[in-house]
């Protein structure tokens, strides 16, 4: 566990605070927010969506039956650790065609996808795109990237709590009572 925590710390320390600041401002300013991530990244994105909802943002996951169209003033948040994934590129194109801004999280800053979005947060962690190198993470495949997303998203929520003038009570009041 200590090795994993050390790897996560290294990744977290490599994330540019200015990229995070800009991303939080995009979230705070957004009308509606839609999120998407493939596989286990998608699980991290879902948790982030839930917390954004708790902060009072209008949030949906791409693919939800009740997901609204993406339009001017909206924000599409998408993660593709390996950089370029066909589904992600297509969805970004649709969001941008509707007028939405796109916040992209990836471990591959030089990907074609990173060149077509409005803002990128670079999370320099191992993904399945680079898990076979000799100095690979202790964690398998893209687990380091996915774990780093969790830590990053929780830190962003802490900042957004302040930026959006929320309280523990206001956040808790938006939690479901259907559990």
Image (cartoon, rainbow, N blue to C red):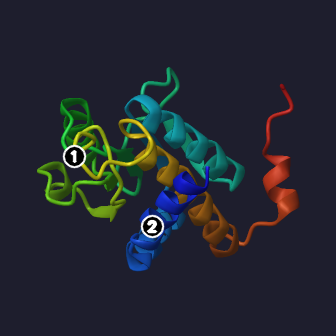
* Residue 4: x %, y % from top left: 53, 52
Q: Nearer the viewer, mark 2 or mark 1?
A: 1
- Give the total of numbered labels: 2
Q: Is residue 71 left or right of residue 160?
A: left
Numbered disc 2: secondary structure: helix
Badge 2, how many Cα within 10 Å: few under 14, some, many 20+? Answer: some
> In this picture, is 73 found above or below 13?
above
Query: What label does residue 10 carry, if any?
Result: 2
Q: Residue at x 38, y 75 (%)?
A: 16
Q: Is residue 83 left or right of residue 137?
A: left
Q: Residue furthest left?
A: 112
Badge 1, how many Cα within 10 Å: few under 14, some, many 20+? Answer: few
Quarter of the picture containing the C terminus is top right
Q: Residue at x 32, y 51 (%)?
A: 100
Q: CA distance from mark 2 to mark 1?
A: 18 Å
Q: Nearer the viewer, residue 66 or 18?
A: 18
Label 2 close to label 1 by CB (< 8 Å): no
Q: Is residue 10 left or right of residue 95?
A: right
Q: Nearer the viewer, residue 126 or 134?
A: 134
Q: Residue at x 57, y 44 (%)?
A: 49
Q: Residue furthest bottom?
A: 18
- Nearer-N-terminus badge (2/1): 2
Q: Residue at x 62, y 67 (%)?
A: 160
* Residue 103: x %, y % from top left: 35, 56
Q: Residue furthest front?
A: 134
> In this picture, is 71 found above or below 46?
below
Q: Quadrant of residue 98?
A: top left
* Residue 117: x %, y % from top left: 23, 56
Numbered disc 1: secondary structure: loop
Q: Which residue is mark 1?
A: 133
* Residue 125: x %, y % from top left: 36, 55
Query: What label does residue 167 carry, if any?
Result: none
């Amino acid at each position: 566990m200590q090795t994993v925590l050390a790897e996560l710390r290294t990744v977290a320390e490599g994330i540019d605070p200015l990229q995070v600041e800009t991303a939080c401002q995009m979230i705070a300013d957004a009308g509606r927010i839609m999120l998407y991530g493939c596989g286990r990244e998608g699980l991290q994105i879902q948790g982030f969506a839930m917390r954004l909802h708790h902060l009072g943002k209008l949030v949906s996951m791409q693919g939800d039956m009740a997901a609204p169209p993406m339009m001017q003033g909206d924000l599409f948040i998408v993660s593709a650790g390996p950089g370029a994934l066909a589904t992600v590129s297509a969805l970004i194109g649709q969001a941008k065609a509707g007028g939405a801004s796109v916040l992209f999280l990836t471990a591959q800053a030089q990907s074609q996808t990173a060149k077509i979005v409005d803002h990128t947060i670079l999370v320099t962690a191992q993904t399945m795109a680079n898990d076979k190198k000799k100095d690979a993470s202790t964690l398998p495949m893209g687990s380091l990237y996915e774990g780093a997303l969790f830590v990053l998203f929780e830190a962003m929520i802490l900042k957004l709590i302040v930026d959006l003038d929320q309280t523990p009570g206001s956040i808790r009041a938006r939690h479901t009572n259907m559990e």
